Image (tube, rainbow, N blue to C red):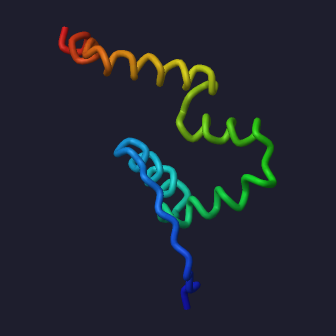
C-alpha cells in the first residue's frame, strides 16, 4: 500500500532542469518526486562539500568550478547566439 501524502509542494523548473531531474531520478531508479524526497532527507546529514561532490559527479564534470565555468560560458554563447554559429562552421 503506497504512502498517503496530503501535502503538496509545487516547484517551477526550466525544461533543462526538469530533464536533469528526471535523468538523476532515473539513474537512482526513482521518479522525480521520490528522488527529491531522498535528496531532502540526506542533505541535513551531508556536508556542503559532499553535496557539491555528489552533484558534480552526477553531472559528469571533474570539478564544481569547471561545471560552473562551463555553464557560464554556455549561457554567454546562447545569449549572443554565437554558439550556433560556431557549431555550424
Residue 36 horizontal/vertical position (percent): 57, 59
In the rendered view, would you say 12 is above or below 76? below
Count of numbered labels shown in the rendering:
0
Q: Nearer the viewer, residue 74 or 11?
A: 11
Q: Nearer the viewer, residue 74 or 60?
A: 74
Measuring 29% from the left and 16% from the top, which residue is drawn there? 83
The N terminus, quarter of image: bottom right
Measuring 64% from the left and 62% from the top, which residue is drawn there? 38
Q: Is residue 55 left or right of residue 13?
A: right
In the rendered view, would you say 49 is above or below 64? below
Q: Nearer the viewer, residue 87 or 46?
A: 46
Residue 68 horizontal/vertical position (percent): 55, 24
Q: Is residue 73 left or right of residue 68?
A: left
Measuring 78% from the left and 54% from the top, which residue is drawn there? 44
Residue 12 horizontal/vertical position (percent): 43, 52
Q: Is residue 23 left or right of residue 49?
A: left
Q: Is residue 50 left or right of residue 81?
A: right
The C terminus, quarter of image: top left
Residue sitting at the far left: 88
Measuring 56% from the left and 86% from the top, which residue is drawn there? 4
Amino acid at each position: 500500500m503506497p504512502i498517503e501524502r496530503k501535502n503538496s509542494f509545487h516547484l517551477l523548473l526550466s525544461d533543462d532542469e526538469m530533464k536533469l531531474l528526471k535523468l538523476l531520478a532515473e539513474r537512482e531508479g526513482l521518479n522525480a518526486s521520490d528522488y527529491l524526497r531522498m535528496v531532502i532527507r540526506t542533505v541535513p546529514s551531508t556536508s556542503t562539500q559532499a553535496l557539491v561532490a555528489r552533484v558534480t559527479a552526477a553531472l559528469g564534470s571533474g570539478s564544481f568550478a569547471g561545471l560552473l565555468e562551463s555553464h557560464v560560458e554556455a549561457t554567454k554563447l546562447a545569449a549572443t547566439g554565437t554558439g550556433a554559429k560556431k557549431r555550424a562552421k
